[in-house]
Image (cartoon, rainbow, N blue to C red):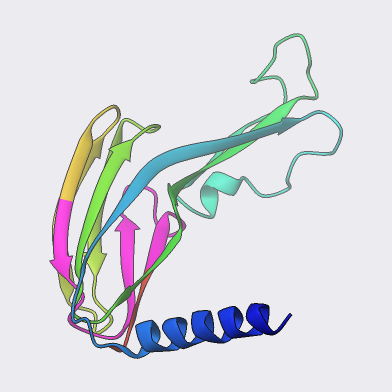
Amino acid sequence: MKMRWIAVAALLGLLVAACGSDAGPSEVTFDVELIEIKGSTDGIAPPEVDPASLSLGYRYKQPGAVDPENANKWEVSTYIFAPGSMSVVQGDTVTLRMFGVNGDVHDVYVVAPDGTVAVEALTVNRGREYIVTFEASQTGHYKLLCTTHAPTMQADILSLGG
């Protein structure tokens, strides 16, 4: 039993040392997919407000448009970045390797915490990979945004102080 406690104490010591070390900035890569999520039902009434009027990122097919043989079935969908949140340490070089799965066109860019543009706008097309890199020079929330499906298609990259 005493050996187990010694092993636990040694492991905790290593963890504390690793967390407290100043290794400096890192290179961090995230694989980001641009996807569409769909859901359909005939079990509840359709929404009173067309979801597409709330955001360019929402889609809506009215009852009867989804399945001509089921006049009550309707469908909604939304475009998202996956993952929707990421974290880095201030000073890290961040690479976003983006792949367009759904949606023919996505116009995307990254905004820094102070509102400046960290990555200039680029068009991401379905079936293609795009790689962008920036330095997380500020602490706070960087936003990965798609203007084609705004305001709901966005991801958050939290930059923590080093």
Residue 133: quarter of image = bottom left
- Above or below residue 54? Residue 136 is below
**Left or right side of 18 for 53:** right
**Image height check: is 63 above or below 132?**
above
Q: Is residue 154 left or right of residue 107?
A: right
The answer to if 139 sits in the magenta stretch is yes
Q: Residue at x 37, y 33 (%)?
A: 103
Q: How many marks?
A: 0
The N terminus sits in image quarter? bottom right
Q: Residue furthest right?
A: 43
The residue closer to the viewer here, 159 or 81, is 159
> At 64% across and 80% down in the image, what residue appears?
3
Say if the magenta span includes residue 90: no
Q: Position of residue 110 (x, y in %)?
A: 24, 64
Q: Which quarter of the picture shows residue 135?
A: bottom left
User: In which quadrant will I find the C terminus?
Assistant: bottom left
Identity of the residue drawn at 22% across and 84% down: 138
User: For the point 38% across and 32% down, which residue is it?
Assistant: 101
Q: Closest to the observer: 75 or 113?
A: 113
Residue 24 pos. (x, y %): 18, 82
Q: Is residue 132 above or below residue 134?
A: above
Residue 60: quarter of image:
top right
Which range is magenta? 132-156
User: From what the image shows, is residue 92 above or below residue 97?
Assistant: below
Front-most of residues 124 and 72:
124
- In x, y percent, where is residue 74? 71, 29
